[in-house]
Amino acid sequence: MRTLTKLGAAMSDRFPGLPGDGVSARSPGRRHVEDIEDRAARLGITIERVLQEYANIAFARITDIVEWDVTIRVNASSALTPQQVAAIAEVVASAGDKKPYRIKMHDKKPVLDAIARYLGMFPKLKTAPNIDGLTPEDAERARQFIIAEFDRIAAEAAQGRGCPQPG
């Protein structure tokens, strides 16, 4: 199974500092992607697994879970496949007899859209124009400033000189 090693390439259009941007592989953006890839590998998250979960939702049929004519009959959860269960977003039971009376399936459209984008069936999403005139370098400098400030505050707190508490 493939892990999310193609994540960097897939994300290079969206985030500065990733491969393909002419920025060093040691850049903060690349390290962030590597952290995500490592975490995904530890959790066993693979491209195939994510796509399978999407497929479970996208191609589920409520008639595999519920039957109706004049009354509604819900199939026992033990009779459902893991793929069918994955497509269920919510089960609501009555307070009195504890019988389910509402089954809500996950919304298919965003999942189908995500699959279609992954497969290249839709054009890439365009980002909004940058009306402030800020560059990716400006955003990275701001990000680094915020990180440095958090580090400074954490160091001061560790030395007992933390921020004054509101009175």
Image (tube, helix red, strand yellow):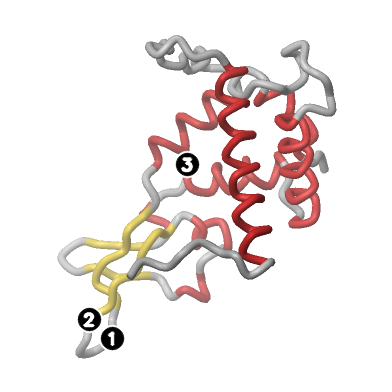
Which quarter of the rendering shows the C terminus? bottom left
The location of residue 124, given as percent across then percent down, is 52, 15
* Corner quadrant of residue 161: bottom right
Crowd tier of the residue under label 2, counting other residues whose Cα lies within 10 Å: few below 14, some 14–19, many 20 or above: few
Q: CA distance from mark 3 to mark 1?
A: 29 Å
Circle 1 residue: 98
Circle 2 residue: 94
| Secondary structure category for the residue under label 2 | loop
Q: Nearer the viewer, residue 83 or 54?
A: 54
Which quarter of the rendering shows the N terminus? top right
The residue shown at (80%, 34%) is: 5
The residue shown at (80%, 50%) is: 41
Q: Say which label, 3 or 1, has the lower sequence index.
A: 3
- Looking at the image, residue 97 lies above or below residue 27: below
The residue shown at (67%, 24%) is: 10
In the picture, the disc for residue 58 is 3
Taking 74 as reference, is 2 left or right? right
Q: Say which label, 3 or 2, has the lower sequence index.
A: 3
The location of residue 82, given as percent across then percent down, is 58, 62
Residues marked 3 and 2 touching at CB (< 8 Å): no
Residues marked 1 and 2 touching at CB (< 8 Å): yes
The residue shown at (41%, 49%) is: 61
Residue type at mark 1 is Lys
| Secondary structure category for the residue under label 3 | helix
Taking 92 as reference, is 114 left or right? right
